[in-house]
Amino acid sequence: MAIDLASEAKKRGIEYFLISFVDLYGVMRAKLVPASAIAGMARDGAGFAGFAAWLDMTPAHPDLFAVPDPDSLIQLPWKPSVGWLAADLYMGGAEVAQAPRNTLKRVAAAAEAKGYRLKHGVECEFFLITPDGSAVADAHDAQGKPCYDVQALMRRYDVITEICDAMQALGWGPYQNDHEDANGQFEMNWDYADALLTADRHAFFKYMVKTIAEKHGLRATFMPKPFPHLTGNGCHAHVSLWNTAGRKNLFADPKGELGISALGYSFLGGLMAHAPGLCAFANPTVNSYKRLNAPVTASGATWSPNTITYGGNNRTHMVRIPDGGRLEFRLADGAVNPYLLPAAVLAAGLDGIDTKADPGKRLDIDMYAERHKARGAKLLPLNLLDALRALEKDRTLAAAVGAETVAALVKLRLQDWNAYSRELTAWERANTLDC
């Protein structure tokens, strides 16, 4: 039985609700609704102008209505008088096909019809920087290899523990927090769950981290590559397929190579086959490609993939198999849309299952130092334009994710690429004025 939001507000002391959605760029949009009006909003939705967000719409389009999902309700741990709700977008009484949450639900329903349910967890990396965005906020965080540095971690104890305590209060099952490989960079991990639940939590996590950072006079960024000499922000996804009841992991097979079933390897084959097009989802910004195919960083390694390969417990590949029953998809970065990432991964993997795709033999080499040994291994796209073109060519992936979603995403991101291409940089002037 669906939660009655008006009753829930009285029970929990919620005075206002944030009815929110995430647009195609992963930007969270919301309206603040008094609890006295939530019954009507729960029925009819909160109205928005689609053109005002990153959606493929014009000012002439009619109103969007964001209908909140009562099961997504999160009471803000730092402001309990406010409840956050993820919403699904409708226009003219019909679901908006290009809306990211609607897209994930549609792909998940297609998987469900085949007897599969995707579960995943994400490793969200972020930097704590100065409010103007110009530098890492902690001037003392300057080690050459800062990963797991206890001093830098504990100097941010108040921020990190406030976020972790919030996740504990919400029942997410957080289990570790660490200082990551770049100066000023952190990662926080919580339990995996069904795809939609993890996507909602991923979207809320980014909002929560930014909000709590601001509360402490800092700024948090998930930008893929905010500093050229430092490791970028990844968003590794650990994925597995389960039966529709969610009780049996269909990737797990003790007799399979590295504990992965034949079905799991077919899913992996789909990820390998569709990797160029997947980049448009996993690495959706111009800046994303400063993280992929990057030169060595100050710490000695970028920790991001450069080739369409997979290995065992080896972090230099696009896909890692850390143990039995799951795959770690290491391609995505911090700018990834929380809903489009699992939708695209699931769509590619399902096609791999349908076609019994062969991922090839795993590589146990260090792809950073021995890439020349991986004969025939394909490179990842070098820039956003290449990724968008790859997605346009990958009709199978585009159809599985949704033609309207893909068309809208490609159109908007091509506008980004064209705007970027028109910019005249300091590097160009320095290297071309005297040509």
Image (tube, rainbow, N blue to C red):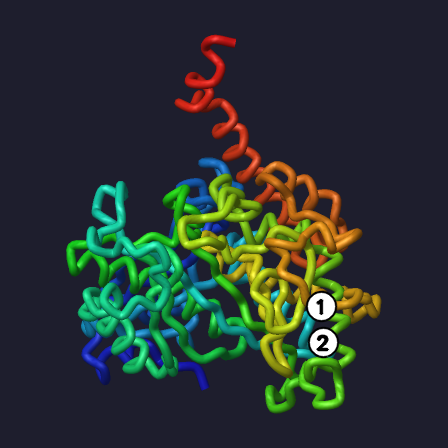
Q: Position of residue 398 (x, y in %)?
A: 70, 52
Q: In this orientation, does residue 30 appear?
A: no
Q: Position of residue 298 (x, y in %)?
A: 40, 49
Specify the amino acid type for callout 1: Leu
Q: Is residue 79 left or right of residue 146?
A: left
Q: Residue at x 64, y 89 (%)?
A: 248
Q: Disc 2 marks which amino acid?
A: Gly
Residue 8 shows in the view: yes
The numbered disc on residue 69 is: none
Indicate the secondary structure of the residue bearing disc 1.
helix
Which residue position holds label 1?
A: 268
Q: Is residue 84 above or below residue 49?
A: below
Disc 2 vs disc 1: Cβ atoms closer than 8 Å?
yes
- In this view of the protein, which residue sits in the foreground, 344 or 330? 330
Image coordinates for residue 303, horizontal then vertical, percent: 51, 58
User: Splitting the image into 4 quarters, where does residue 309 fall?
Assistant: bottom right
Quadrant of the rendered image containing residue 159:
bottom left
| Label annotation for residue 264 | 2
Q: Residue at x 53, y 43 (%)?
A: 289
